[in-house]
Amino acid sequence: MIQPRVDAKSRALDGLRQAVDTLRPYLTTPDEQANLYLIDEAAARLAQPVQAGFSGLMDFDASRLSHLLEITGPDLAVELLARLTEDLTATQEKLDQGAATADWKRLREGSHVLISLSGSVGAMSLQTMAENLNAIAHRQESDALSTLMPPLAAELVSLIELIRATQPPNSAYR
């Protein structure tokens, strides 16, 4: 029964890629091209298989995310998860851009946000890496940045996927 869903997902993602390719000649400004790139990247991430039962995070305390959802309440949990996804994705983009250009200010700003968000939801290893990134950005250490970014980026992707896959508590239990 899983096969039709996978086939439908693959067909839909192929359609999205075709639509982007069709649009590409008509969208020529740098901003438009950047948006097409983001769509391509998102489609590639969506096409990746999800490993059941594995979060991809080295140290994840699920009780923190559960507690956060519990105190938020079922009526606002959907919005909380959406905001977390949005904020983590924006932080991911900021850090990717900062690392690519050695923009130390951008890296410091992004690391501050990531320290807070990752700690709040229980991504303890990611929080530690974000703290290390902040120190690296303050010292402007390019070699250390190159070493830290791949595992940090991988954990951040895993956290975003985990948040997207999290089901909010059922509001029927009021």
Image (cartoon, rainbow, N blue to C red):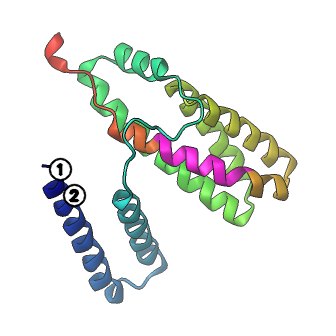
Residue at left offset 35%, top offset 57%: 46
Q: Is residue 132 left or right of residue 74?
A: right
Residue 52, percent from left and from top? 36, 40
| Residue 153 x/y as whole percent | 59, 51
Residue neighbourhood size for the residue with mark 1, other residues' Cα within 10 Å, grouped as few (<14), some (14–19), many (≥20): few
Task: Identify the residue at image location x=28%, y=27%.
Answer: 168
Quadrant in which the C terminus appears = top left
- Tag 1: amino acid: Ile
- Percent position of residue 12, x then y: 20, 66
Indicate whether 96 appears above or below 111: below
Mark 2: which amino acid?
Val
Among all residues in the image, which is located at the extreme bottom?
Answer: 25
Q: Secondary structure at mark 1?
A: helix
- Compared across the picture, whether 18 is left or right of 90 comes to left
Residue named by callout 2: 6
The residue indicated by pointer 1 is 2
Q: Decide: marks 2, 1 in contact (CB < 8 A)?
A: yes
